[in-house]
Image (tube, helix red, strand yellow):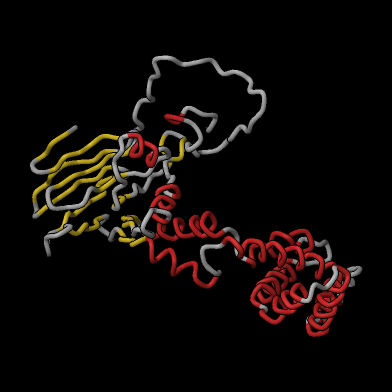
Amino acid sequence: MTRAASAKIIGGHNFRVLEVDGFPPVVFGCPPGLVKDFAGQHRPLPHHYVLPTQTIVQGRNHFDFEFIIYSFLFMKGGPVKASVYCTRSQKARFKAILNETLFGPSFQHLLQAQFRKLGAHPRFKASDRERFAGLLEDWAADKTLFRLYSDLLKAHAGDRTIGKRIAEYFQRILKKQKWLARKNIPRLESRLARNYIQCAQLKKEMDLFSLTGETGRSRLIDRIIDFHLFDKNHSVSIAAGNRRGEKLQVIQSRSSVFEVIKKDHKLCTVDLSRLDPPENLAHLKPVRKPWFGVTFLGVGSGFSARRRNSCL
């Protein structure tokens, strides 16, 4: 624990918590295991997080903000808003990650994945692939087509009837898209219908558990996260909790190294440029082959105590 004037820095495993009188606690970094560390100490999660520009340290990923957001989103009493201090590019990447982890792929992404093989057809030139990608975007936004599929489901139509009606819809589309019809791909209408139906069925299932519709995704993220961006001088301000006008200035002097300033007085430096040494366990049992189970490979750390798992 380090003290500088009225500031106190509490060390965590590859993250730091800054406590300053009159200001909310501020976490620097968001490595895997952060939520678990706070839970193990029976401490509430802070609401303010400063992200270093370098999240890959010594070959390891130290950005795992999803579990933090899950914790706030599903807290008792309703969602709680978090404040994130980052660069503009980090905000864009972060929102893209949350779109996938919170909501899953969009309907357009489902169609792109399902039609990937058709889009790479040898009869397609590079310009044709671009035009076909545009068609997939149009079909994803085609409410009439999706309503047709939904109405057929409500009417308990059989698979053959659904396939036939959707194929007829695509047949009308191909009359307008003559460049695609001229490719002479065998049974193209049926192929388009079959792939579309599979994606539409998956979308229907996903919508049952979705937090919001596709058009409301950005609004939901904005409702649970406040983004504050570093300016061209690599500086960002953190407002005081109850004192109006008072702010902490955080300057990222170099990658993962922050200087904290209050009223032109430097309070402290937070350095996350190096990894903390691994925890030493007093009793480390050798790895044994399980009778059954799942081995998880990735950057997560939520599946075993104290990050001792198979994650790489």
Seen at 50% across and 15% down, the residue is: 285
Seen at 39% across and 66% down, the residue is: 222
Is 239 rendered above or below residue 71? below
- In the rendered image, residue 171, in percent from the top left (x then y), is placed at 84, 80
Q: Is residue 247 left or right of residue 296?
A: left
Q: Is residue 234 left or right of residue 87?
A: left
Label tally: 0
Q: Is residue 254 left or right of residue 64?
A: left
- In the rendered image, residue 232, in percent from the top left (x then y), is placed at 28, 60
- In the rendered image, residue 265, in percent from the top left (x then y), is placed at 8, 49
- In the rendered image, residue 25, in percent from the top left (x then y), is placed at 23, 48
Is 172 rendered above or below residue 198? below
Q: Nearer the viewer, residue 155 or 204?
A: 155
Q: Is residue 132 left or right of residue 81?
A: right
Is 36 rendered above or below residue 164? above
Q: Quadrant of the N terminus?
A: top left
Seen at 81% across and 70% down, the residue is: 193
Seen at 43% across and 54% down, the residue is: 74
